[in-house]
Image: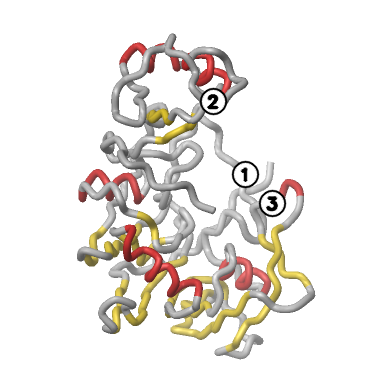
């Protein structure tokens, strides 16, 4: 059951929406004590409260010594240390009152998470377009480039997201991976994907059992020892294309997860953008649930052709 939509929400700050928390009993007698106990990961609650950066449901700054009243709604903004600029730009492909469509670059996350906040597609778009209500209609991995859709209005969001649930969206990807002369193409790949246990939780594994992932794989052209492939997923499992291509002995070039996890760089190491994952969301098409018109959006990007090798194990 979803939470009721609040009557008032704070404005964006540099493209970032405010977070909210409801006061509950058992975390102290004052709001300062409640916030420190309820959200201890934030170390600067006293400073935020002193600056007036914690608001009540009406938008008024709250006092640190205000008493805890269970059910009171508090608003605050997520803060992270300055993020290195990811030096690739989002290309706006389409915008109307219901949809925003962009051409996402490699390396840029779609939504905030972990160490990424400002350097995400969602926050950049909110800041650029001034649309606080933007929500991704679907997701792309941080390493994957290509067509990405956002819904604008809460009232029409369900209609568009239902297209994905009902498999009414046609997606075509392209990838560069090794060439296997013994593999007959095109082929229809059906497999069962499950999350790997333990330390390899980031990886999806192909296991015996009822298939839950389907992809049509076709050859676009040979590139010597490599090949340019067209991948048409019929389902939408996590890492589906990457895991299925790897299981076929065709790991996508630049993949830092398949066939094995690449070592994490040192925290102070400069970011390396030299080896992008050679996976591109080329086109998305569907019948618009509001207008009944056929919609099709295509990426303007092209995949590279240089071989990418994982770093040696240490």
Gap between marks 3 and 2, in whole Å? 27 Å
Residue 90 location, x and y as percent? 28, 55
Residue placed under numbered mark 2 in the picture: 39
Q: Is residue 249 left or right of residue 145?
A: right
Tell me if residue 231 can be seen.
Answer: no
Q: Which mark is residue 201?
A: 3
Gap between marks 3 and 1, in whole Å? 15 Å
The 10 Å Cα crowd at callout 1, few under 14, some 14 to 19, many 20 or more, is few
Q: Secondary structure at mark 1?
A: loop
- Quadrant for residue 180, please give it: bottom right
Gap between marks 1 and 2, in whole Å? 31 Å
Q: Secondary structure at mark 3?
A: loop
Q: Is residue 232 left or right of residue 304?
A: right
Q: Earlier in the sequence, mark 1 or mark 2?
A: 2
Who is closer to the viewer here, 279 or 202?
A: 202
Residue placed under numbered mark 1 in the picture: 263
Q: In which quadrant will I find the C terminus?
A: top right
Q: Earlier in the sequence, mark 3 or mark 1?
A: 3
- Quadrant for residue 49, please give it: top left
Would you place residue 235 above or below residue 78 in this image? below
């Amino acid at each position: 059951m979803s939470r009721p939509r609040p009557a008032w929400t704070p404005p964006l700050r540099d493209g970032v929406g405010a977070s909210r928390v409801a006061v509950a009993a058992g975390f102290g007698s004052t709001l300062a004590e409640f916030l420190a106990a309820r959200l201890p990961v934030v170390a600067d609650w006293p400073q935020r409260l002193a600056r007036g950066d914690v608001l009540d449901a009406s938008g008024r700054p709250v006092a640190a010594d205000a008493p805890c009243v269970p059910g009171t709604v508090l608003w605050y903004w997520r803060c992270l240390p300055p993020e290195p600029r990811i030096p690739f730009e989002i290309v706006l492909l389409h915008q109307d009152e219901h949809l925003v469509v962009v051409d996402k670059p490699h390396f840029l996350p779609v939504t905030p998470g972990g160490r990424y906040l400002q350097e995400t597609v969602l926050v950049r778009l909110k800041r650029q377009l001034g649309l606080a209500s933007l929500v991704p209609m679907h997701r792309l991995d941080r390493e994957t480039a290509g067509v990405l859709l956002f819904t604008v209005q809460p009232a029409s969001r369900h209609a568009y997201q239902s297209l994905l649930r009902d498999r009414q969206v046609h997606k075509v990807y392209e990838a560069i991976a090794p060439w296997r002369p013994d593999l007959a193409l095109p082929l229809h790949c059906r497999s069962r994907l499950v999350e790997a246990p333990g330390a390899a939780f980031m990886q999806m594994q192909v296991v015996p059992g009822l298939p839950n992932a389907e992809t049509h794989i076709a050859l676009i052209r040979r590139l010597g020892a490599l090949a340019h492939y067209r991948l048409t997923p019929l389902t939408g499992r996590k890492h589906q294309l990457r895991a299925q291509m790897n299981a076929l002995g065709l790991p996508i070039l630049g993949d830092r997860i398949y066939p094995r996890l690449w070592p994490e760089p040192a925290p102070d190491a400069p970011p390396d953008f030299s080896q992008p994952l050679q996976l591109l969301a080329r086109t998305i098409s569907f019948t618009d649930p509001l207008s009944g018109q056929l919609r099709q959006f295509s990426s303007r990007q092209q995949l590279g052709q240089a071989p990418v090798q994982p770093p040696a194990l240490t």
